[in-house]
Amino acid sequence: MKNKLTEKLTRWLYGRYGTDELNMAILVLALVISLIAGIVGFPLLSCVSLGLLIFVNYRAFSKNIAKRAAENKAWRNATVVPRRTFKAIRMGWKDHDHAYRLCPKCHQICRIPKGKGRIEVHCPSCKEGFEVKS
Ligand SMILES: [Zn+2]
């Protein structure tokens, strides 16, 4: 009985997209809106949150993997600067001998020695030169 149910569920889930960064961001947004709706007591916000949760499930169980992956790629491209900025800040917390800055051209994280004053740095990825305070 259990094996048959597991087999059916496995067969139904086969070829589905699953979850990704965009789905997680929409899920967090839905939870924040739901919290605000609970605090403010505005039922329309709960409907918006529910709609977002339905959209998250639609994306996760979608069989159009190419389209969902393209949406996620567009999301990742749109959020590259804040994601890498936070990553550079986190890397700076762990490494006290270096500063981490984003290349203004390609947004690659560049490691810079600390305590050298204002220096010109060349991005290892795109070779763009830019001045930073280390
Ligand atoms: Zn660069």
Image (spheres, rainbow, N blue to C red):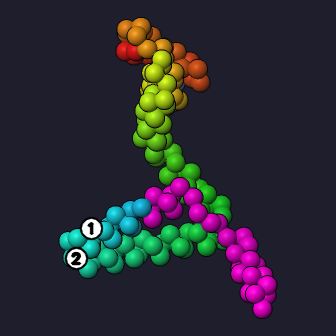
Element type where label 1 sits in the image: helix
Seen in the picture, residue 36 relative to 88 is either above or below; the reply is: below
Q: Is residue 129 visible?
A: no
Residue labelled with disc 1: 36
Q: Give the label on residue 42, or none.
A: 2
The location of residue 88, given as percent across then percent down, is 46, 32
Q: Give the label on residue 98, or none.
A: none
**Which residue lies at the image location 45% right of the left edge and 28% below the top edge?**
92
The location of residue 71, given as percent across then percent down, is 54, 57
25 or 2, nearer to the observer: 2
Q: Residues within 10 Å of mark 1 (few under 14, many from 20)?
A: some
Q: Residue furthest bottom?
A: 1
Magenta stretch, residue numbers: 1-27
The picture quadrant where one finds residue 60 is bottom right
Residue type marked 2: Phe
Residue 5 in magenta stretch:
yes
**Which residue lies at the image location 20% right of the left edge and 71% below the top edge?**
40
Seen in the picture, residue 74 relative to 113 is either above or below; the reply is: below
State the predominant SS element of the stretch in magenta. helix
Can you tell me whether the CB of the residue at mark 2 lies under 8 Å from the nearest atom of ligand 1? no
- Measured Cα–Cα span from mark 1 to mark 2: 8 Å
Q: Is residue 37 left or right of residue 27?
A: left
**Which residue lies at the image location 37% right of the left edge and 15% below the top edge?**
133
Q: Is residue 51 left or right of residue 110?
A: left
Residue type marked 1: Ile
Report the quarter where the C terminus lies: top left
Contact? badges 1 and 2 (CB < 8 Å): yes
Q: Residue furthest left?
A: 40
